[in-house]
Image: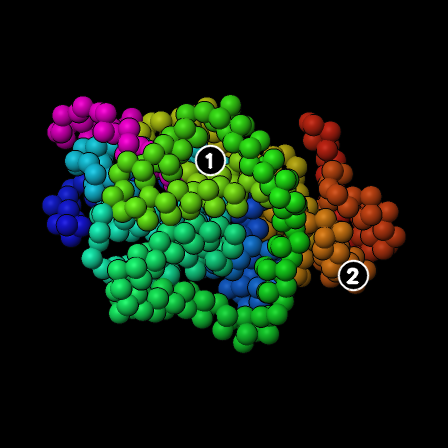
Amino acid sequence: MISKWISQDKNIYIGLLIYTFLLILFCSKLSPLYPLTEWADVNLYFNMGKAMMNGKTLYSEVFDHKGPVIFVLYGIGCLISNASFFGVFIIQCLLWCCMVITTYLTARMYLGKIYAFIIAVVFPVFMLTHTNDGGSAEEFIAIFQVVSLFLFIKFFKEKEPLLHKPQYMLVHGIMCALVLFTKINLTVFWVFPLAGVFLYLFLRKEYTNFIHNILAFIIGLLIIALPIVLYLWVNGALVEAWDIYIVLNKSYANIGSFSDIISKLFSSAYLRLRFDTFPFLLILLGAIYFPVRYLENKIGKVVMILSFIALYTAIFVTPRFIFYYSIPYYVYGLLGLIVLAHYLKINSNWKVYTLCAVLALWWGISKKDFFGLQFNELFGKKEGSSSLVAFTDIISQEDNPTLMNLNLNLYTTIFTKLDIVPNVKYFVSPNLSHDIYPEMRNEQTKYIEQGSIQFIIMSSRMEDYEYFNSLSVMNKNYLKADSILSSDGEKIYLYKRKDN
């Protein structure tokens, strides 16, 4: 059936690919239309990837506590363009195209062409409402989830499916592994649906198919895991990667007691219903009503609902929540849109397809305020905040400058803009307090003592400001090259090493 749709709907796929490219071109700040993105996270990922591609070893020579997959994606992007996000933009476009086509195929299982097309152009805009400037780890994770969601729905759609194709389970293994090595807690999305597939096969006594699927899933995991583990082992960073990605993140999570968890979940649900009412209701419609109403397999009904509950819990029990963390559970909005589409009455012709695509594209651009706040940035070629421009100009005057940003803020952009390859492990300070991870500040102090860095950026609002500001070796080895007071009262300092 899927192969038949692919052969019959070629024009629709071409239209969706063009639409997706235009949507990302206008609505992601990784796009070449934007002179730069000041979002610290994506600049950190990019420069971690760039350092890796320049021979630095992840975790032992350059530090962040995300999983390695996100750095690999950005590293591949930097091979295309090492001083801009153009390469990452290409990867982003390809993955979003994959998601949109998969969205169409998912909707097509229940709807006609025009309705499936509408969902395929609306759903990515629905996702864009929470993607910030574009390129977050959660954004890529959601794409991997959509692929597996399609295959889970395809299987559980039937009341008594005969067998589960091992090649589909291979895909699940690959998708799950990509998330496992990006943000490990979000792999809970796969736990219950996979258990449901295996349980169904076991109860039907399809033991051969059961074993084949287990092997296929393991192979899928290994396709991603083996190269990563081998890379870390060969470079002597396997233990350190475990300590940072597993042990440190476990300490950082600090989810609290059972009562704390319940309190967080209820309060987050209340806040979603109050301030994000329609999107959250649409998500609930897809996560709860869709499985009950549209999945014929009884095990499938239960496991898909449990998958949502597990994912929602994993996202909202963390002590520090940022709005784009919710992107992974927005994938259930796809199923909610399928439910709503059953109430639409639309004639199918090319004019309707075109109108839907144009309206969805305009909605996406409007959501990102492209012709509002971003207008001057696009057509005026704004190069960032005044302090960022001033600091960049000073640093760019040096040959092969080295830099350390004692914050996680927009100044991480300078690494990207000036194509500076990090020369120390803690070249940027992620949001980890000294109590949780003392090694970072201790090592940064050594860099200052040894004069390992030519330029240092420091903010009056960073957590360790008083410590570094009063550090005697800072004043001994460095001079204030510039300082700027921001409009909101934050003081930003640029220090330059005294080279005698």
Q: Residue shown at 39%/42% (left/top)?
A: 305
Helix, strand or loop at label 2? It is helix
Q: Residues within 10 Å of mark 2 (few under 14, many from 20)?
A: few
Residue picked out by circle 2: 446
Instruction: Tell me the mark number nearer the camera, choosing from 2 and 1.
Output: 1
Real-space CA distance between mark 2 and mark 1, rounded to the nearest whole angstrom: 39 Å
In the rendered picture of this protein, how many numbered marks are placed on residues? 2
Q: Which residue is mark 1?
A: 130
Q: Is residue 449 left or right of residue 212?
A: right
The verdict on residue 38 being magenta is: no
Residue 305 showing in the rendered view: yes
> Residue 18, can we see it?
no
Q: Quadrant of residue 31?
A: top left
Residue 421: give x, y in percent of width and height: 59, 59
Q: Which residues are magenta?
A: 331-359
Tell me which corner region of the image, top left, top right, bottom left or bottom right, holds residue 80.
bottom left
Badge 1 amino acid: His
Q: Quadrant of the C terminus?
A: bottom right
Q: Is residue 347 magenta?
A: yes
